Amino acid sequence: MSHITFNVAAKCDKAGRSQNQDNYWVCPDLENIGDNSNVGNDHDIELSPKGALLVVADGMGGMKSGEKASEFVIEGIKKIFANIPDDILGNDNAIISFIKEAIIESDGIIKAYAKDHRESEGMGSTIVLVWLLGEKAYCGWCGDSRIYCYNPQNTLVRLSHDHSYVQSLVDDGKISEEEAFDHPDGNIITRSLGDSGEKANPETKIYPIHRRDIFLLCSDGLCGLLTDEKIESLLSDNCTSSEDALKALWQAGEKEGWSDNATIEIACVTDGGATPTRKAVGYSEKKPQPLSGGKSDGIKKDINLIPNFWANNKQYFIIVGVVALIAIGLIWYFSIDKKTRSSSNQEFNVEQPTDNPQYNSGSANNSNDENNHEEGNTPVVSSPSKPNKPNPQPNPGSSNGNSNQHPGRNNNANPNITISGNSNENNVPQKVSEEYSNMLRDTYRSINNINTYITNAQNCRHFKSAEANALNDFIVNARELNSKPDVKVLSEAQKNVLGTINDIAKKASDALRLYKVYDEPRQQQYEINPHQSQPLRHHEDPYEDPIYRNI
């Protein structure tokens, strides 16, 4: 076995936030845990029989909870690694079990604290660690903090695999890695320590150590700000000095503009280890490849419509692109509907509610319409209150031969209402019911509020009961929209709307599984004047959503 020498550097800072919820630990020699004199000075250290350990934790939960959670992670790791049994050294399975035990110990400390301190309920943390031992790097992680390895003989690779919602989209082939970098749901993680009633489920991997390997551990404050290509470029220019590499990465983060806490740990192998291979050895789980062309097939997110080379101004292009797509969709939909109505030589009668002011104009034509209703000339069409009959058979039109019976009405006011009449080919075009159209429209309009509730939960680490009820109702409506027979006759525009609703319903379902539900004390909300009641803001009252208008 060759002797391995390395140098190590680390830095943890609040960076782009007012409070630092990250934490870390670097131990260059686990046989002498208290000695950190060789960290940050590029002094080469010979790897001891018990090895060296690098750990990064990114806390969550708001207020002081996130800071406490990351502290507890480091506390648990130190507690376990202070007593490494000699009989596990050299046994890969025993070493992996020991790492999992240490991570689960940290998870238990967080949960015990949260149980005794209700104000900290929902606190949690990510973790990544690398144990350099012998000629191997033993990795363990839970969450979206990352472990990288770079070698000048090949390329930068990830040794960890993010436990996040966005990474699951990449794994399913729905979006590319480039789309995942700036995805709006990038802060939703699927595994963490302390943030659920379940036991922690860390993932582990073993990698060989090669000569001149550079191991990089970081929180998402860095890897969420700099692309892998940028990180690789900086490491390649500073591949022998851990201190220089750390400074280069930190300066790049400052130049880009920190938006989160940042923690960076770097270990440079200067001698020893296996001979580097041309192909880098990294996380090798087989995953479906995303579709080419920069647009995913299964996810209808706005961000997927923006080409990658517009990344620097992506927010502006997203807004312009979404507005343009909506405008094009509406123009296309109304033009198709107009052509459908004009394809018959006979009259078409449109059922419109008489109590709706948008249909009650004061024109003489509308007066003629009312007379026609009184004379029984208007055919009977299906009521929107019967969802089980979305496509009723129309009755014959009136026999007076007047093909311009309703010139005063705004026929575009509700493009999804049922149209009946006789065509030259005796083939009536099928349309979805008015009830289904209204439900589709109202559910779609509530998406912004649903996203707001999910964002609130991500910040507070829990849902309010009213927010959770709104999400559950949205999911129920999505299921009902998919179960009705109207689905078979949807137009392309309506299919796109339903697809978006389904995506948001899945996102809502994932969020409900991830976050707990409880209400904070009411006296802390909007107490501007104790003698004057303040109405709830629209975005905080789910009962103001369009989804509840027909209930």
Image: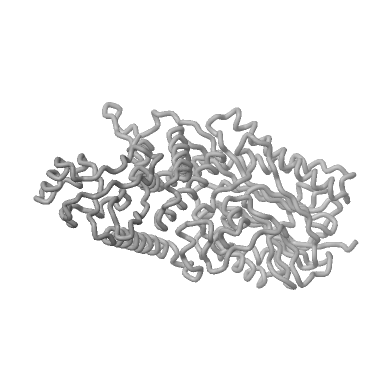
Toward the left, the furthest residue is 364
- Report the side of 120 relative to 131 (left or right): left
Query: Quick check: can you spot residue 182?
Result: yes
Quarter where residue 241 is shown = bottom right
- Report the side of 326 relative to 247 (left or right): left
In percent of width and height, residue 97 lies at 80, 44
Q: At 83% across and 64% down in the image, what residue appears?
A: 273
Q: Coloured how?
A: one colour
Q: At 48% across and 67% down in the image, what residue appears?
A: 311
In percent of width and height, residue 353 lies at 23, 42
Compared to 368, does 72 lie above or below? above
In this orientation, which residue lies closer to the viewer: 135 or 485? 485
Q: At 48% across and 48% down in the image, what residue appears?
A: 502
In percent of width and height, residue 113 lies at 62, 32
Q: Quadrant of the C terminus?
A: top left
Q: Quadrant of the N terminus?
A: bottom right
Query: Quick check: can you spot residue 27?
Result: no
- Report the side of 121 relative to 449 (left or right): right
In percent of width and height, residue 499 lies at 47, 52
